[in-house]
Image (cartoon, grey):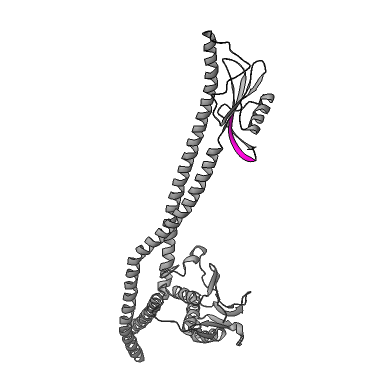
C-alpha cells in the first residue's frame, strides 16, 4: 500500500519536474534557434548593403572624375568566403562571383536565367555540394542605383550543424535531468512517507490492542445474554424485546471487532500465512452448509452447483481459513442484500485459461454502476442507512479484497439495480 502511494507521489512530482525541465529546454532551444535565424537575416541584409555600397562608391568616384562606372565588371572583394552572388545587369549581362560553391553558383545562375525571384527576407535552400549536404539562405534583390537584379546565397550550414549538436546535447541532458528528477521525487516521496508509516503503524497497533481489549468484555456480555435467554420466557415482553436487541448488538459488535482484528493482522503482516493445497469445491460445500440456516431464516433459496469431484483444476494453493472466510463473506453479503423469496447461487466452473472459478450470484437489490469501483474500500457502504439496519460496517468486502490480493486471485463484479449481482472469483491453479 505504501509503496503504491510512494510510486503515485513519484509519478506526480516527477511529472511536474519533467514538464518544467522540458519547458526550460524547449525555451532555450527555441531562443537559440531564433537568435541564429535573426543573425542569418542580419547577415543577408549586410550583404545587400555591401552590394549597394559597392555601386554607390563607384558612382561617387565617377562623379569626382576618378573613373567611369563599368557596368560589365564587378569587383567581388567585399564578399566573404561563404557568400556568393549572381548579377544580371540592365543589358542582360550575367556576372558570377568567384566561389568554391559550384553547385550553388549554378543554381543561382539557373534562377537568374529563369528570372525566378526569391523572398527578400531570405529562404532556406538545401543542395549537395561536393558530396556533402549544404544549407544556404538565398534571396534576390533589384539594384536600384545601377539597375539589374542579383541573386545571392549565404552558407549557413555551420548554424544548422550547431543546432543539431545543441539539440542532441539538450535531449541527452533532458534525459539525464529527468532521471535525476524521478530519482529525487522517489527519494523525497519516501521521506514524506516516513511519518505516515509511523502514524499508520500506531493506528494499526491501537486497532489491534483495542480489538483485543474489547473481545473479553464482549465475550462476557455475550455469555451473560445467552444465560438470560434461558429464562427469557419469565421476563415481561418489554424486557424480552430489550434482551433481543442487546443480543443483536453484541453479535454485531463481536463481528466488527473480529473484522478489525483481521484487517489489523493483514496490514501488519506480522504473521506468516500458511499455504496448503485446498479443494475449492469442498470449501464451497462446507460454506454452503454453514450459511444454509441463515438463508432459511430469511426465506432465501440457496443453491449449490458444484459437483463433488477431485480434479487437478479444483485445487488451489492458499490458506484454508482465509478462503473459507472469503466465501463466507461473499455469501453473507449476498443473503444480506437479497429480499425474502430471492435466490443465491454458488457455482463452480473453470475459466477459458483453466483457472478454478467460483461464482456467487444473487437476485438482490443490486449495486449502481457508479458505485462498483468503490465497494472494496474500507468502511464504504452504498446505502449507509440500509447497511446499518442490516448490521454492516463496510469491512466485509475490504477483507475479501485483502484475501484475494494475498492469494493472487482476481474478482470481477457485475450488477444491475433491482436484479442482483454476480461476484466471479478466479483463483490461481495449484
Q: Of residues 119 and 135, which is closer to you in this image?
A: 135
> Is residue 278 placed above or below 154 in the rendered structure?
below
Asked if residue 137 shows in the view, the reply is yes
| Location of residue 170 in the rendering, given as x and y in whole percent from the top left corner | 48, 48
Image quarter (top left, top right, bottom left or bottom right) of the C terminus: bottom right
The overriding secondary structure of the stretch rendered in magenta is: strand
> Is residue 261 placed above or below 14 in the rendered structure?
below
| Number of marks in the rendered image | 0
| Location of residue 81 in the rendering, given as x and y in whole percent from the top left corner | 55, 30
Asked if residue 336 shows in the view, the reply is no
Give the side of residue 81 with respect to residue 225, left or right: right
Residue 246 location, quadrant: bottom left
Residue at 52% x, 87% y: name it.
Answer: 286
Q: Of residues 313 and 219, which is closer to you in this image?
A: 313
Q: Of residues 26 and 79, which is closer to you in this image?
A: 79
Report if residue 7 lies within the magenta region: no
Give the side of residue 269 with respect to residue 56, left or right: left
Residue at 67% x, 18% y: name it.
Answer: 93
| Location of residue 152 in the rendering, given as x and y in whole percent from the top left corner | 59, 27
Image quarter (top left, top right, bottom left or bottom right) of the N terminus: bottom left
Q: Bounds of the magenta span?
A: 131-138
Residue 131 location, quadrant: top right
| Location of residue 305 in the rendering, given as x and y in whole percent from the top left corner | 60, 82
Amino acid at each position: 500500500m505504501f509503496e503504491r502511494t510512494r510510486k503515485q507521489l513519484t509519478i506526480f512530482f516527477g511529472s511536474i519536474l519533467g514538464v518544467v525541465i522540458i519547458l526550460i529546454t524547449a525555451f532555450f532551444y527555441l531562443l537559440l534557434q531564433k537568435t541564429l535565424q535573426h543573425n542569418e537575416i542580419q547577415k543577408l541584409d549586410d550583404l545587400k548593403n555591401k552590394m549597394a555600397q559597392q555601386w554607390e562608391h563607384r558612382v561617387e568616384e565617377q562623379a569626382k572624375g576618378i573613373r567611369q562606372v563599368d557596368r560589365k565588371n564587378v569587383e567581388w572583394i567585399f564578399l566573404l568566403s561563404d557568400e556568393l552572388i549572381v548579377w544580371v545587369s540592365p543589358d542582360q549581362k550575367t556576372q558570377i562571383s568567384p566561389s568554391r560553391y559550384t553547385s550553388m553558383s549554378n543554381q543561382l545562375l539557373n534562377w537568374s536565367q529563369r528570372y525566378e525571384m526569391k523572398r527578400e527576407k531570405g529562404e532556406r535552400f538545401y543542395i549537395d555540394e561536393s558530396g556533402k549536404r549544404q544549407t544556404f539562405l538565398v534571396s534576390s534583390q533589384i539594384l536600384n542605383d545601377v539597375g539589374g537584379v542579383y541573386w545571392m546565397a549565404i552558407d549557413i550550414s555551420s548554424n544548422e550543424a550547431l543546432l543539431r549538436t545543441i539539440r542532441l546535447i539538450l535531449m541527452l541532458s533532458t534525459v539525464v535531468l529527468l532521471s535525476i528528477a524521478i530519482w529525487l521525487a522517489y527519494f523525497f516521496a519516501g521521506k514524506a512517507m516516513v511519518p505516515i508509516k509511523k502514524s499508520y503503524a500506531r493506528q494499526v497497533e491501537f486497532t489491534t490492542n483495542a480489538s483485543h481489549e474489547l473481545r473479553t468484555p464482549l465475550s462476557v456480555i455475550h455469555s451473560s445474554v445467552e444465560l438470560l435467554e434461558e429464562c427469557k420466557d419469565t421476563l415481561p415482553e418489554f424486557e424480552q424485546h430489550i434482551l433481543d436487541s442487546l443480543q443483536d448488538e453484541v453479535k454485531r459488535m463481536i463481528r466488527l471487532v473480529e473484522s478489525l482484528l483481521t484487517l489489523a493482522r493483514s496490514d501488519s503482516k506480522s504473521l506468516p500465512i500458511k499455504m496448503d493445497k485446498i479443494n475449492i469445491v469442498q470449501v464451497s460445500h462446507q460454506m454452503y452448509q454453514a450459511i444454509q440456516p441463515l438463508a432459511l431464516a430469511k426465506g432465501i433459496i440457496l443453491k449449490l452447483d458444484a459437483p463433488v469431484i477431485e480434479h487437478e483444476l479444483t485445487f488451489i494453493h492458499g490458506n484454508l481459513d482465509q478462503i473459507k472466510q472469503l466465501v463466507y463473506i461473499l455469501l453473507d453479503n449476498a443473503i444480506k442484500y437479497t429480499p425474502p423469496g430471492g435466490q443465491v447461487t454458488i457455482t463452480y466452473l473453470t475459466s477459458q485459461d483453466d483457472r478454478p472459478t467460483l461464482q456467487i450470484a444473487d437476485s438482490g437489490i443490486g449495486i449502481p454502476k457508479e458505485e462498483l469501483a468503490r465497494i472494496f474500500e474500507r468502511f464504504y457502504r452504498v446505502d449507509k442507512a440500509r447497511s446499518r439496519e442490516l448490521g454492516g460496517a463496510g469491512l466485509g468486502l475490504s477483507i475479501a479484497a485483502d484475501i484475494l490480493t494475498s492469494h493472487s486471485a482476481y474478482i470481477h463484479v457485475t450488477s444491475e439495480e433491482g436484479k442482483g449481482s454476480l461476484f466471479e472469483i478466479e483463483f490461481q491453479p495449484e
